[in-house]
Amino acid sequence: MIQFILNGQEVSSTAKANVRLLDVLRQEFALTGVKCGCREGECGACSVILDGRLVNSCMVALGHVAGSTVMTIEGYRATARFAALDKAYAAVSAVQCGFCIPGMLLASECILARNPRPAEAEIRAGIAGNLCRCTGYHAIVEAIGIAAREGKGLW
């Protein structure tokens, strides 16, 4: 049995240690905000925050998260930081099909947690591991900049 903190709650899984965290989150915990994209660590759709770092959950074995803290978009949605990002993304229509957005929002959180006032180049580098086939990134970069300016004190 592997125990870890998931979205602020202590949980355990009986899945084998070599099962992908992505599959455990979606199948065992019904956290479908973690999207299954490429399964190769290339698209970022399955991003989660693991002990404060953005990771592709398709590349993490369940055994690796024993004793760790995992945050998915479902847990992040309950935060004031999410509300600031949500408002900023909506203001510039940075969401189209929505498939990449959970990963983009968690990447945004990690960028702003590292630097509350990132330069555009830092934002672009921070979301580089997340593929979006709809917006072309400009609106997403703009939204993160807005959240940085208007979310004073949150990050």
Image (cartoon, rainbow, N blue to C red):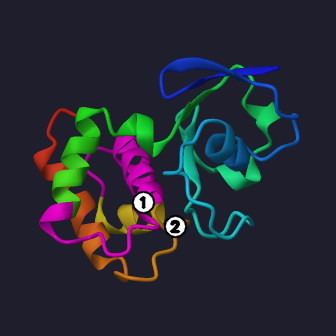
Query: Is there a contact, CB below 8 Å, between mark 1 and mark 2?
Result: yes
Residue at which label 1 appears = 104
Inspect the image, locate mark 1, and give the three-letter code of the amino acid beneath it: Met
Q: Which of 143 and 117 is in front in this view?
A: 143
Q: Helix, strand or loop at disc 1?
A: helix
Q: Quadrant of residue 14?
A: top right
Please state the horizontal and vertical placement of residue 5, each as a whole percent of the image.
Answer: 59, 22
Tell me the residue at 29%/61% (across/down).
Answer: 119
- Is residue 107 shown left or right of residue 47? left
Mark drawn on residue 130: 2
Report crowding for label 1: few under 14, some 14 to 19, many 20 or more residues within 10 A (C-alpha): many
- Is residue 150 shown left or right of residue 100? left
Q: Which of 118 and 97 is in front in this view?
A: 97
Q: How far apart are marks 1 and 2 (CA)?
A: 6 Å
When the figure is inspected, residue 82 is found, relative to residue 149, above or below; the finding is: above
Which quadrant, please, contains the C terminus? top left
Tell me the residue at 29%/33% (across/down).
Answer: 79
Q: Which of 80 and 22 is in front in this view?
A: 22
Please state the horizontal and vertical placement of residue 95, each as a whole percent of the image.
Answer: 30, 69
Tell me the residue at 46%/66% (across/down).
Answer: 100
When the figure is inspected, residue 5 is found, relative to residue 42, above or below; the finding is: above
Mark drawn on residue 71: none
Give the magenta-colored segment's residue range: 90-118
Which quadrant, please, contains the N terminus? top right
When the figure is inspected, residue 78 is found, relative to residue 37, above or below; the finding is: above
Residue that extends furthest to the top in the rendered view of this protein = 10
Of the numbered discs 1 and 2, the one sitting upstream in the chain is: 1
Q: Helix, strand or loop at disc 2?
A: loop
